[in-house]
Amino acid sequence: MDQSIALTIGNFDGIHRGHQAMLARLCEGADDLRLRPAVLTFEPHPREFFAPDSAPPRLSTLRSKLDAFRAFGVAATIVARFDARLAALSPEAFIHDVLEKRLDTRWVLVGDDFRFGKGRGGDLALLRSKARQFSVEGMRTVAIDNERASSSAVREALRDADLPRAAALLGRPYAITGRVAHGDKRGRALGFPTANVPLAHRPPLTGIFAVRVHGLGKPARTGVASLGVRPTVKDDAKPLLEVFVFDFNDVIYGRRITVEFVRKLRDEERFPDLDTLARQIQLDAEQARAFFADEESCPTTPRPITSPR
């Protein structure tokens, strides 16, 4: 590194309110010590490396995390490839070879449940006792409505389609950002042309949703979205986000959009034929329109959401 750093370490999946508090404290501490605020994160997630079939779904892409770090004032992000070599590092080697020699770390901020090194053998106490050139601060858990803000809690809320709980933990509505790609044009053939956003990883929720779409001008547009594997039209398909944007016909291939999930309408299901599917999509669109009309007549204070750059 060109300059000594203040560092926090973690996966930061979802950038929930606990992560946000940590990033704010990192920048505050770095400013006090006249250090460069930096984040060390890992790709892939260690659980994806050790047990890819049972790893939890991701809440955020690497790009969305990098955007969030910059927005909080982080000056540098170190993305470490999590592989067999890194997994085999002892806690002591991680401290001395990575944090001190390679990164020139002078101050470290981690959660009080932080674990690191081979077999997760290192903890906060070991980090403090073995550090030779940096001081260590442990950050307490952030609780929201008496619940610990964690990536696991957000995933649980999304799995249960409890979008208000997820939004409370995240500090914003749950959303997926991605680039619109060409699809098989099946939605257009059914009378509902969709913006298709391919997903690199399994999403933390599935189903049919009323959504707001950011990145297509202001204000955000409303629509209905399918998130999942489209069981009626394909077998063994990869997860895909398909969005039918109400009253919108522009060509937007290649555009980055952010799809905010507002209300779950139903689960995915397999229909006997495409005509039945088209009728159901019509009902879904009507239900979503009615939801937004009711919301407009009884408005509540919206939570902030960051539109794509």
Image (cartoon, grey):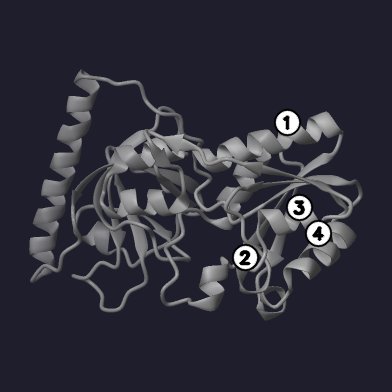
Q: Amino acid at mark 4?
A: Lys
Check residue 128 in the rendering and tell me which mark sits there, or answer none: 3
Q: CA distance from mark 1 to mark 2?
A: 26 Å
Say few, some or many: other residues with alpha carbon within 10 Å of mark 2 (under 14 / 14 to 19 / 20 or more).
some
Find out whether the residues at labels 3 and 4 contact each other: C-beta distance under 8 Å. yes
Q: Residue at x 56, y 75 (%)?
A: 49
Real-space Cα separation, disc 4 to disc 1, in angstroms: 25 Å
The residues bearing labels 4 and 2 have C-alpha atoms spaced at a distance of: 26 Å
**Residue wearing tag 4:** 130
Mark 1, residues whose alpha carbon is within 10 Å: few (<14), some, or many (≥20)? some
Vertical order, 183 against 235 (above or below): above
Residue 95: image quadrant is: bottom right
| Left/right of residue 298 with respect to residue 66 in the rendered view | left
Q: Secondary structure at mark 2?
A: strand
Instruction: Residue 7 in the image: state x and y as whole percent.
Output: 75, 47
First in sequence: mark 2 or mark 3? 2
Q: State which quadrant residue 204 falls in.
A: bottom left
Q: Earlier in the sequence, mark 1 or mark 2?
A: 1
Q: Position of residue 286 (x, y in %)?
A: 14, 41
Q: Say above or below: 176 vs 27.
A: below
Residue occupied by mark 1: 28
Q: Residue at x 14, y 68 (%)?
A: 270
Counting labels gives 4
Instruction: Name the foreground residue: 269 vs 77.
Output: 77
1 or 3: tag closer to the N-terminus: 1
> Residue at label 2?
43
- Which amino acid is tagged 2? Glu
